[in-house]
Image (cartoon, rainbow, N blue to C red):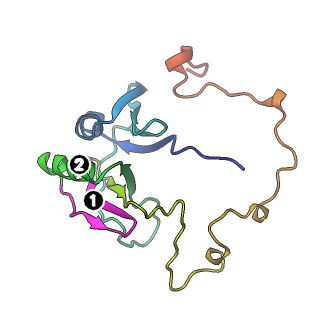
Amino acid sequence: MVKFNGINHLAMVTGDMDSTIRFWRDLLGMRLVAGLGRIGYRHYFFQLSETDLVAFFEWSDVKPVPEKDHGKPVKGPFIFDHVSFGVETEEELWELKDKLEAAGFEVSDVIDHGFIHSIYSFDPNGIPIEFSVNVPGRDIRRNPTMVDAAPSTVTLEGSEPIPDKWPVVKTPTPKTMRKAYPGAGSELFHGTRKNE
């Protein structure tokens, strides 16, 4: 079974990379660790943790989205509600709340969800963001907890992956056929891409 080690990067979009850098790097304190681009296109990466990154594409015709309350149901095509970033301590959660408010961003009260305490806000692009700290002794990763009055049949199968629910790989890619092709970002380390 594949063991995941975090979110390598979460890719979002902005029409204004400068205000995005000011927010994510200068206000939140995430290092800007990589950037690539050309006229009309940028892709920048901010370090969230030792293993996780937040990335933004800058496309000139993108406008900030209208703010939608976190978790408020919508209708029609939709793909993303909000993203929550973990912090280590309750003190850091309050520090972020104060920093965001001082910078003129609306921030919710601190909300007690039982296993996490959270604040909610929006970045300059209208992206709904949450910051959460784990409540000591209530780690749902170690002790999964379901309180659903009407769980589906699939939910009742439990928290552990069930391997026989998908087809088994019958013909893995041979090592001699495995090749990584240059893509966006390879120019940071290998020079110009072949397709340019």
- Left or right of residue 108: residue 36: right
Query: Which residue has dot 2 on it?
Result: 96
Farthest residue toward the bottom? 149
Please name whichever residue, 176 or 15, is drawn nearer the observer in this view of the structure.
Answer: 176
Please name whichever residue, 90 or 70, is drawn nearer the observer in this view of the structure.
Answer: 90
The tag earlier along the polypeptide, 1 or 2, is: 2
Tag 1 and tag 2, C-beta contact below 8 Å: yes
Local secondary structure at mark 2: helix
Tell me which amino acid carries mark 1: Ile
Residue at 31%, 54% in the rendered image? 65
Residue extent of the magenta highlight = 106-124
Quarter of the figure with the C terminus: top right
Up-down relation of residue 160 to residue 23 (above or below): below
Please name whichever residue, 54 or 43, is drawn nearer the observer in this view of the structure.
Answer: 54
Q: Position of residue 157 (x, y in %)?
A: 67, 74
Dividing the picture into quadrants, the one containing residue 193 is top right
Q: Position of residue 183 (x, y in %)?
A: 58, 28
Query: Which residue has dot 1 on it?
Result: 119
Up-down relation of residue 144 to residue 191 (above or below): below
